Image: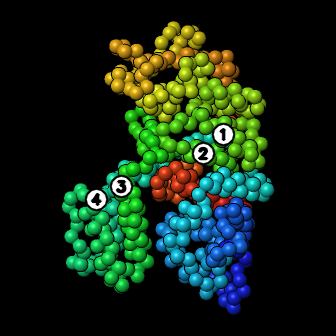
Amino acid sequence: MLIQQQQIQFSPYSSLYDLIVPQDNLLRKINELIDFSFIYEELLDKYCTNNGRKAESPVRMFKYLLLKTIYNVSDVDVVDRSRFDMSFKYFLEMSPEEGVIDPSSLTKFRKLRLKDTDLLNLLIGKTVSIAIEKGIIRSQSIIVDATHTLSRSNPFSAIDVLRERSKLLRKTVYLFDDRFKENMPKKNDTYELKKELDYCKELEKRIEKEQSLSSISAVKEKLNLLKETIEDTQENFTLSKDTDAKTGHKSADSSFFGYKTHLAMTEERIITAAIITSGDKADGPELPKLLEISQENGMDVDTIIGDGAYTGTKNLQLATRQNIRVVARLNVSVAQGTRKEEDKFEYNKDADRIVCPAGHMAIRKAKQGKKNVGKNQSHTYYFDVEKCKSCSLKEGCYKEGAKTKTYAVTIKSDLHQEQIAFQETEYYKEKAKHRYKIEAKNSELKNVHGYDRAISYGIANMQMQGAMTIFTVNLKRILKFI
């Protein structure tokens, strides 16, 4: 049974908050900035309102997850810190003497209550509406880009992750008691996952028995991280399996295994839209949806700022229909409008290569035709014939016995000639100066909030991680303006 969370209940100790939690405390500012009742309204149908035991407020549960994101701690540690940290208690709207939840409740909340909830768009929409209401967003431009996040399974195997976590725990223990080395279990010197799990469990058991060490907060944090890794490894058996993650390319020679977050952001650095895909997806095709979401969130867009990946014919046509200017350097391999099977053969702007329907990337490209005669020129991409010979999609694509497999891109259409002319205007040059801002935002997401690596498996969990992280950076940005 669900009862909506009220304000902090009367307690003879409530006045402590005014003494202990400063007015400029981040959590106090967030509580004053935003009314979290929208979380209750969104999740109401996930609870029974008139039967069963009283459930913990969804608002408070959500706030626990937000604290995890802001301070980058485990479930166990965010709950443990909420026992004694008065700013946490104030943020959670608890009375000072009130008890905390069991950490396992957070897992249930994520899996049962947030499942099938479009948390990403909900949270971004809320922060954008606040920014517009407070007059923070004044520009009519969105800056678009994609940032990659490594899968939890990449580039480490399950054993590598376990060993790294156990190593951190041992090093932390030795900082406080170097003599404890004698009590450590013998390390696993094989590459068998089961033996490594057994070693980590024994390490966990021995340190927990030593109360003088396990009660130290620094040791406890590393111990809890190791516990979560052990549990997750046992549940999934191996950290190398992430069926939703895919291989993407950062350049022609480097790749990553994971996800992409496609972002739209204002010149004031408020993220207005985000789409999370597997790492193999191209950037350009996501632009129409990013624009649509930004507009639904209240943005009046007259300019899109990005790189060459967003100058595809369909994107330029969409922008023309809506009288929107595209401040992006035209890339002929993306932008030509007559290439065959454009929906199947995608252009990867990071690698500057065409990718075939089977996911194979061209190994080289060459320009053909007479110079300075644009309409007769083309970019020809060459694929690895050995891969084509054994490809499951070769029928109708590769001719048996052919020594080469190529794909040609014609340069250029009238639409693109107009874009080239626009690139020489002062407006274009001035707006292009804002593009660096989204690179800085990507860096903030990764380096400050751990968005460089997924914390769990599957695209649903990646979307939840993205939702909480983007919500956090947007709130911080709004507070900075205020």
Amino acid at the residue labelled 2 = Ile
Nearer mark to the viewer, of 3 and 2: 3
Picture residue at 56% right of the left edge, 24% below the top: 342
| For residue 438, above or below residue 344 | below
| For residue 424, above or below residue 105 | above
In the rendered view, how is the structure colored? Answer: rainbow
Amino acid at the residue labelled 1 = Lys
Residue 205 pos. (x, y %) = 32, 76
Hey, which quadrant is residue 117 in on the image?
bottom right
**Which residue is label 3 attached to?**
238
**Which residue is label 4 attached to?**
193
Amino acid at the residue labelled 3 = Thr
Amino acid at the residue labelled 4 = Leu
Element on which disc 1 rests: helix
Label 3, label 2: how far apart the Cα atoms are: 27 Å
Q: Is residue 229 left or right of residue 304?
A: left
| For residue 26, above or below residue 290 | below
Label 1, label 2: how far apart the Cα atoms are: 8 Å
* Neighbours of disc 4 within 10 Å: few (<14), some (14-19), many (20+): some
Element on which disc 2 rests: strand
Picture residue at 44% right of the left edge, 32% below the top: 359
**Which residue is label 1 attached to?**
289
Hey, which quadrant is residue 130 in on the image?
bottom right
Q: Is residue 29 visible?
A: no
